[in-house]
Amino acid sequence: MAIQVDPRCLYTKTHEWVRVEGEFAYTGITDYAQQQLSDIVYVELPEVGDRFEKGEVFCTVESVKAASDCYLAAGGEITEVNEALVEHPELVNQDPYGEGWLVRFRLDNPADLGDLMAPNDYAAYAAEQEEAHT
């Protein structure tokens, strides 16, 4: 199955994406992750104002196959959550880089993002992961 990447994003090895907009960043799960999870039925989001360190679990995405923790790629404070996912968790499947975003957060330290992958590197990484699981 073809893996989509968004050229505006950076990527983690745990299959989250980050799109930086000034001092803030949006994050969600990648197309590869949503394909692996299959039909998403519930998203447990954090509260606005919650703080997380880099690498901490900030939300859980549940599908018909499994529940998957999502890890924040950089430390920061949650400034917005995607409330649409409460009623429509399937948006994560339908548009993982757009309407299916999970949270917006204020970056504590943009240098935290230094170890993330560029889109082409992530596409190759995800393809290797997919090959290993088939």
Image (cartoon, helix red, strand yellow):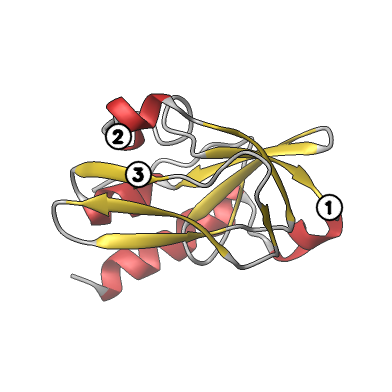
Q: Considering only vertical position in the picture, is 128 above or below 104? A: below
Which amino acid type is marked by label 1?
Asp
Q: Which residue is mark 1?
A: 108
Q: Earlier in the sequence, mark 3 or mark 1?
A: 3
Mark 2 lies on a secondary structure that is: loop
Q: Position of residue 119 (x, y in %)?
A: 58, 48
Which residue is drawn at the image coordinates 21% and 61% (left, top)?
66
The kind of residue tagged 2 is: Pro
Discs 2, 3 touching: Cβ within 8 Å: yes
Residue type for callout 3: Val
The tally of labels here is 3
SS category of the residue bearing label 1 = loop
Question: Residue 43's mark?
Answer: 3
Pointer 2: what residue? 89
Left or right position of 34 against 39: right
Residue positioned 48% across, 65% down in the render: 14
